[in-house]
Amino acid sequence: MSEIRKICVYCGSGDGRDPAFKTAADRFGQIMAENGIGLVYGGGSLGLMGATARSVLRHGGHVTGIIPEFLVERERMLRDVQTLTVTKDMHERKQLMFETADAFVALPGGIGTLEETVEMLTWSQLGQHAKPVALANIEGYWDPLRVLLTHMRQEAFIRPELEVGYIVVNSVEDLLPKLHEAASAAPEPKETDAQVAERM
């Protein structure tokens, strides 16, 4: 697989209860910027989303914000980013985030964060992409999801032939090495019919 140039970070539009969540968001933004990795995120200025984006910007990195028009005011769109796209709805937003990023990281967040992360796991399971997906398991935040996935396997709803791989790290410092390792082991994506036609 090609190198990781941009990472899509899913995370909460709130700070959460534990201060460690915001500390992790701020630190990961710094790590991305210092390693020349661009951020793709949901475009808001609140919570962990805003903390991650501002940290990337503060440390000289590039931020791509993608936000649906109905959330521009509710999530206080961050206008300081280098690339900003306002979409007509959530579906367009998520598709653009997927297309723009080379990997995905889930920091702590709510239902939206969970939904976006699980969608990427689903698409991977169905063979629609081979981009790495990582859970930043800060203070054990994602342990309940891991228990649920184990339960699904035990009940034979995630069958061996439908297994999906994902990365779990307890510290944001471990994210980039694990993502690079997974990306280098992933198969090259197949060209779509449109891409083949464009080359001909």
Image (tube, rainbow, N blue to C red):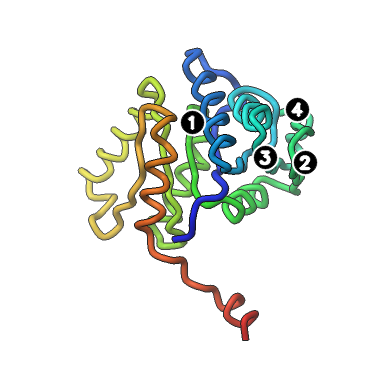
Distance between the alpha carbons at the discs numbered 4 and 2: 11 Å
SS at badge 4: loop
Circle number at residue 69: 2
Q: Mark 3 sits on what residue?
A: 63
Label 4 or label 2, whichever lies nearer to me, is 4
Label 1 or label 3, whichever lies nearer to me, is 3
The residue sitting at the bottom extreme is 200
Q: Earlier in the sequence, mark 4 or mark 3?
A: 3
SS at badge 3: strand
Give, as a three-letter code, the residue at label 1.
Answer: Leu
Q: Quarter of the image containing the C terminus?
A: bottom right
Q: Mark 4 sits on what residue?
A: 76
Crowd band around label 1 with a 10 angstrom C-alpha radius: few (<14), some (14–19), many (20+): many
Give, as a three-letter code, the residue at label 4.
Answer: Arg
In the image, taking residue 154 as reference, residue 67 lies left or right, namely right
Where residue 196 appears, as percent x and y from the top left, is 57, 80
SS at badge 2: helix
In the image, taking residue 56 as reference, residue 134 lies left or right, namely left
